Image (cartoon, rainbow, N blue to C red):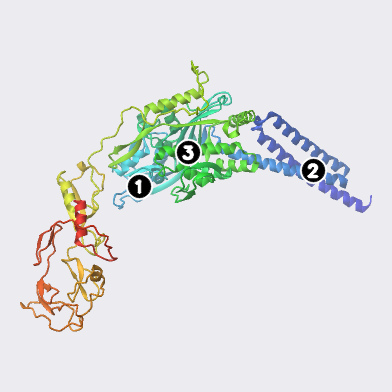
Amino acid sequence: MTKQNKMSKRKLSNMNFVLAAIAILTDILMVLGILNITRYSNFSKSIFVLINVVILAILLVLNGLIAYNAYAMKKSILYVTIGVLVIAFLSGGALTYVTTRVNKNIDKIINTGTTSEKVEVSFVVYSENGNFAINDINDLEGKTFGILSNTEEQVGYILPKKELEAKKINVTYHEYDDYNSMLMGLFGGEIDAAALPSNYVAMFEVNDGYSEYLENTKSILTFDKNITVTTESGSDKDITTEPFTVLIIGTDEQRSDALMLASFNPISMQVTLTSIARDSYVPIACYAGKSEDKITHARVRSRQCTIDTVEDLMDVDIDFYFESNFTGIVKMVDALGGIIITNPYEFVGQKSDARGKMTVWVPAGTNRLNGEQALAYARERHLYANGDFQRQANQQQVIQAILTEAMKLTDVNKALKVLDAAGDNVSTNFTVDQLISLFNYSIKKMNRSYVKNANVINIVGSRVTGYGSSKWNESMQLNLYIYRVYQGSITDNRNAILRNINLDSKIDAPKAISFSANWVFTAPTLTNETYSEPIIHDESPDTVLNFSGKLLSEVQEWASSRGITVKVTKVHQGEEGYVDSYPENMVIAQSVRAGIKTENVTEITVSIITHEGATKNCPANSYYDSGKKACVCESGYYAKNDSDLNTGGAGCIANPTTTPTVTPTTSPTTTPSTTPTTDPTVSPVPSTCPEGQEPDGNGGCKPIQKQCGENEEPDGNGGCKPKEVTESPNTDEEVPTGFIFPNRFFNLFSKLFR
């Protein structure tokens, strides 16, 4: 053998070692791919077997070529081996990547009972005036600290107690059934600090009246921990043959912003969707004694608390849950390429982030909406006359549209994007096998149907009806909005759900039938808007009014009838809050806010506008007349229109032969100026007037006009007389810019607030 042949053989041998190493790596990738797709074998047993056979055949050929090439050491065999190896390696890598990516997201979505979550706890304090006596955790020593009464609650009980014990801070614990009650206790001064979720502001600011209080809170400590969260496993039903129920939860800052109880009958392919208003005031399953609260607050405690609460409310067993936050909805809709929505009104809605700005345009008509638009549509309620009820219908429409687009998926990349979007934002306790079985079953139903795929599943929507009410909160001294549900509506919706999931239910056969070609089908109504049930409204106590814009006399009359003392703080010109155009004695602030029970108030201080001693930044050649509350030309000239008096217009021309300054003197006599004026329209003005007098505009002097009360007017001699009330004629007279309202407007203002 020549030296050249030996070197060639050695190179081939080295190449074989490299190829063998790559082949082993390819084998590993292929085996991992097979293991990853095993959990999805229920999609199709035959396809799964075929994939395994193909992969094993490729591996067999590949490894055979590697072995033969090592023996034969021929370049032709080497090139074939390299080609097969490259294809197998890339295929194995792609298979492993895709299946690993899918499995990672599926594992995030599927909740088998316990999951690990990071939670954040804040120690929160409150100060009505912003002067906080407690500024760090050490200031809690000897204070009263609010926690939850549930000893298994991590955020509200276990973690805060551990933190205080670790830092050796001694406090007196005060227990509450829920975070809302704890927050009320903090606002009412019952406790000095409270253990709350770190996002407590976003959680509770949606409640009417809370924002003002939340602005006066602060967190003195925030810490996080990883905890194990337990949720009951889903049912083991065969959901392709047995009807089931699923609670759909849409969350925002840990609140259940959307609640829909769905029932699915796989035989009839009918789905009922029953919406429950988030403000529904119902017994909460995880509260002590199942005390009542808004159902949205149940999710603040836990997902399982929400599930149990809906089960108790509807008296229906819930087999599964499906939960998504707002971010998940946005990302999934975008991954699907948008959804088709029919929207009757064009509007600009809120973005998905916690305090999102109103920047999302949602067009009217039938359009394909992106994720932000779809979410804005599902959240909008102020635009519609029936408010929250229409929002529930919109949410159901969005759910249906998402399902419709998902059923059309044929693009693998799009499906992977949907899974990526769902991975961090969606949770359910369906098993993988159950979801695959349901998917396969639905596909078969579609293939056997003559209708469009979107119409194979018949979705019937309804809602639990009720009425808006209020409940007085003693701690906050506020009437809080709640939604009381009709028991009749609960019963009707429950019956509709049971009819859908009860395979043994019987339909009464009609004794007679009739037919008309003009007959138009109308879907049956599952629930009524109103029911003949007692309407419950908590009796509201007598509360302090909002006195802003009212006159002092009105406040005094109101307070006198309730035995409340009124103290007055006058706001003069130049002081904060003073507005020159406001009438005398108008209230601009009060020490006790509106809504406080009057039985808790003995004294109230109001800040009122006063024009006493007010001066004007008058233009050149004019002075401020306190009686007229306006600037007057020093020449004594009264301009023909009011704007001249107040803006230094043509009427305020300096007298070139007289001194414009008015100098008081003790002289009992008045010496009128005899110097002629260069302006024939300007009356002569005295150079001096005695003390207590002022120019009268005709060359003489007159008594200085004293300040008159709101129901008085000048008498022409420096004094005051009762004001004559006359109706001002209705004119289209324009009020120039900078003009001080004349007395007739003050009269009108006074009558409006009297």
Residue 421 — which label?
none
Residue 211 — which label?
1
Amino acid under disc 2 = Val
Quarter assignment of residue 686: bottom left
Distance from label 2 to label 3 (Cα)? Answer: 52 Å
Q: Earlier in the sequence, mark 2 or mark 3?
A: 2
SS of the residue under disc 2:
helix
User: Left of 603 or right of it: where is 9?
Assistant: right
Compared with 418, 536 (above or below) is above
Distance from label 2 to label 1 (Cα)? Answer: 68 Å
User: Left of 338 or right of it: where is 725?
Assistant: left
Q: Which residue is mark 3?
A: 395
Amino acid under disc 3 = Gln
Q: Earlier in the sequence, mark 1 or mark 3?
A: 1
Quarter assignment of residue 299: top left
SS of the residue under disc 1:
helix
Q: Which residue is mark 2?
A: 84
Q: Are marks 2 and 3 in contact (CB under 8 Å)?
A: no
User: Of 602 and 650, which appears nearest the observer?
Assistant: 650
Amino acid under disc 1 = Ser
Compared with 305, 411 (above or below) is below
SS of the residue under disc 3:
helix
Q: Earlier in the sequence, mark 2 or mark 1?
A: 2
Q: Residue furthest front?
A: 517
User: Of 122 and 685, which appears nearest the observer?
Assistant: 685
Q: Residue at x 19, y 57 (%)?
A: 747
Q: Are marks 2 and 1 in contact (CB under 8 Å)?
A: no
